[in-house]
Structures are given as C-alpha cells and as structure tokens.
Image (cartoon, rainbow, N blue to C red):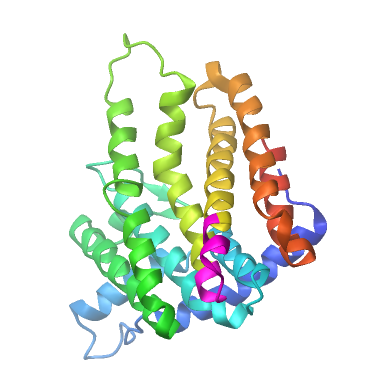
Amino acid sequence: MSAPAELAAWLEQVRADIDVDLASRLPAARGKDDSAYDAIDRLHDAMRYAVLGGGKRLRPAMALAACEAVGGTAQQGYPAAAAVEILHAYTLVHDDLPALDDDDERRGRPTVHVAYDEATAVLVGDALLTAAFGSLANLGPRAGDAVGLLAQRAGSHELIGGQCLDLELEQQGSDAPPPDLATVERVHRNKTGALFSAAAELGAIAGGGTDEDRTLLANYGMAVGIAFQYADDRDDGDFDELAEAARAQTRGLVDAALAAIDRYGQRAWHLRSLASWIGSRV
C-alpha cells in the first residue's frame, strides 16, 4: 500500500538524502579497468552494491524524524540514520546466504552471494556491521550511548536472537502445529522491532534527547516495528491463520506508538504519519 502523498514525498526526499550520505560513508573502490584494482576493491564494490541497491529507507527516516521530534536537526541525525541502515544491510546480506534463507534475489537484483560469491558476502556483512558502529563515532560525546544501544539491540538477546527464533520456526516439520500469535510476535519483537526501536532511540540520542525521550521513542519504534512486520506477513501470505488476530494486535500497537509521541506535538508529524500508515497496511 502506497503511503499518503505528503508522507510519500517526505520519504522520497529522505531516501535521496540518505543515499547521498550513505555513499559518502562507504569505502570507494578503484574502477575494474584500473590495473591496481584488487580483492579489497572488489569487497568495497560489494559493500556498496549491498547498501546502495534500493530499499524504502524507513529505518533511517525514523531516526531522522525522532531526532527532529526531540528538537535536533536532520544533520545531527545522519550518523545515527546511516548506522541503522548499514547495519540493516548487513543483516540482509547474511540472511540471504545459503545457510540461512538461501535467497537469490533481493530488491529486484541478484543477492550479494550470487552477484559476487558466498565468501565475499560473509565478509561484506562483517565489514558493514563494523562500518555501522564506525558511523556512530561521528556523534561525538553522544557516541558512547549510541554504540551501547545499537550493540544491545543488534546482539544475541534481540536482533540475532530473533533470527535464531525465526530459523527454529522454519525448521519445524509440516506436521508441527502452527505457531500462536505470542510466538510469532516474539520473533517480530526481536528481529524487526529491535532495529526499529534502535532507529528511533538513536535519533533521540543524536538530537540530544533526555532519558525520558529515549524511552518514549524506543517504545514508539518497537511498536511500529512489530506492526511493520505484521504488515509484511500479510503481504507475503505468512501466518494467514493469524491474520485477524494480527490485525487487532496492530491496532493496539499503533495506538501505543501514537501515545508515546503525543508530547512532541507538531515536531512528531512524520513519526505519527509513519505509524498510522504502517498500521493501515495490515
């Protein structure tokens, strides 16, 4: 479902701006016709292929919107926005590998392990994860808080743990009973919600928000992230037997997200619009 016109226009502008910023943060490679082109250049090519190959850029948009909601500027929020998107790209590269989802196409193009090779894809993911934390170093005195937060959200208790739970569900035999909503939402909370929550809270950190701002925006991001994954489930035809329950759950998640940002008034217009649009997709 397309976003409403005003929100869509903002998202398109953010996507263009963040793509320019991302391109400036990723290592450049010599051209393949340069006699000095080597294996490291090929790795850098593959990193840029992974990050700059399209995508909605919702997570960095959320980081920028959260930064502005607490009184910061988009410029202050770019290091956080880039870190979230680069880390997201790393997760996609690794998720696509034959050992995990074994996908051959991502965003209408061959996945990294197909376009390059499997070993390169592993190294690309490793390099992007490192680059994500490097981006946060540009937050100056706020970098320590940001690094600690992203490490928590992207680690074994949340994002990577969610991937483990997802694999466990996929590996169950066809004779296993379908999962209930609580089981599915645990996966969504860890795997998708954690990174959306990180995006919003990192935006608050970048904008100089208080501890209360951080908590409110983390809660907002978590609720919107889970709702976003329910919408993806619907689009992909996953867990059809839970569709009605997921729809009801999404309404509650969106209400909670909107309540979390009520105090920010007009500064949170983009955050409110994002939550309402994502909720309407289920």
| Extreme-bottom residue of the structure | 35
Q: Residue at x 61, y 76 (%)?
A: 17
Q: Residue at x 45, y 40 (%)?
A: 189
Front residue of 81 and 205: 205
Residue 137 location, quadrant: bottom left
Q: Is residue 123 left or right of residue 169?
A: left
Please say if 199 is above or below 176.
below
Which range of residues does the magenta coloring cover?
Answer: 204-215
Please say if 26 is above or below 87.
below
Residue 111 on image: x %, y %: 37, 54
Residue 81 on image: x %, y %: 51, 70
Residue 109 on image: x %, y %: 45, 55
Does the image show residue 55?
no
Does the image show residue 87?
yes
Q: Residue at x 65, y 25 (%)?
A: 248
Please say if 268 is above or below 233.
below
Q: Quadrant of the C terminus?
A: top right
Residue 268 location, quadrant: bottom right
Count of numbered badges drawn on the protein: 0
Q: Is residue 271 left or right of residue 176?
A: right
Main SS of the magenta part reads: helix
Front residue of 70 and 273: 70
Q: Is residue 155 magenta?
A: no
Residue 39 location, quadrant: bottom left
Residue 184 on image: x %, y %: 44, 28
Q: Is residue 121 left or right of residue 260?
A: left
Q: Quadrant of the N terminus?
A: top right
